[in-house]
Image (spheres, rainbow, N blue to C red):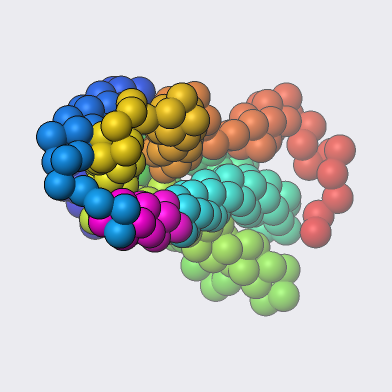
Amino acid sequence: RALSMKEIMYNQNSILIAAVLFALLLIAVEVGYRLGLRNQPAVDEESRSHVNAFQASLLGVLALLLGFTFSLALQRFDSRSQAVVDESNAIGTTYLRSQLLPVSMQAEVQGLLRSYLDVRVQESTVTLSDLAGRQALLDQAGQYQNSLWHYAVLAAQEDKSPVTSGLFIQALNAMIDSFGSRNAALDRHVPEVVLFLLFAVFLLTWGIVGYAAGAAGHRPSKVAYLMLVLVVLLVFIIIDLDRPRRGLIEVDHRSLTTLQTAIDSGNYGDTLSTP
């Protein structure tokens, strides 16, 4: 499947998005404050109570949306992290079980697996916005999978004991499945419509906060601005979690690089027993 990236915000820097949101919220507070100040003479106590009740309701909705979106981003981050570990384990198991193949095939299959692992490690360093570079590495990985499957078929045809070749085929299947699962996890992120809804609620909420303060005849409190900063920080974390290969929070790929080092050392099969 060809890669695509149609979202507007996904390719934008998370710090830039947070900075723009911060500026927009400050503008919303100021606009709300000026409107409230202008309407202050016409706002009686009952109207103020309605505005305050609406403000409290919006803050509740905001907290709910923030919690939901943060949970969504964190779950996807955890899924990506686990997918890396699963793929590393699957490649390692396949490499170990390659020792069960006929001797004439072992060196070639293990060489293919080493090259396949190198490609997967290299793909881990490519940003998701580099569609062409990532697609080229995915295609290369697919070619290695086809070559490995070719040897699996040959082993099944030549092996008098289908159990041993079956163990390798089972591990190879798991490795190919983990490849697909990891790529799917990378392509899943918080839907952009959720972020736009979140930002709209932010702007409306802080506009009402400013309006309530203006209607009461004073500037918004420092606590309101502190909450604004905290909300923007939370949004930054949500967006940063949702960009697995950019920003401050990135998925850890050490399980793949550790496996690569162990296999390149030449004694991976000697220091570990087959599963």
In the image, residue 70 above or below residue 256: below
Q: Residue at position x 37%, y 53% from top?
A: 52
Tell me the residue at 43%/28% (across/down).
Answer: 221
Q: Is residue 272 above or below residue 45?
A: above
Q: Quadrant of the N terminus?
A: bottom left
Residue plotted at (21% across, 48% down): 43
On the question of residue 163 being in view, the answer is yes
Q: Is residue 178 left or right of residue 259?
A: left
Residue at x-position 67% and y-position 76%: 162
Quarter in which the C terminus is drawn = bottom right
From the top left corner, tell me how far across and down residue 242 is, in percent: 42, 42
Which of the two residues, 66 or 168, is positioned nearer the viewer here?
Answer: 66
| Residue 91 % position (x, y) | 61, 49
Bounds of the magenta segment: 47-62
Q: Nearer the viewer, residue 129 or 141?
A: 129
Q: Residue 57 location in percent, x, y?
A: 39, 60
Tell me if residue 24 is in the magenta stretch.
Answer: no
Relative to residue 157, is residue 127 drawn left or right?
Answer: left
Does the rendering let one see residue 139? no
Q: Main secondary structure of the magenta part?
A: helix
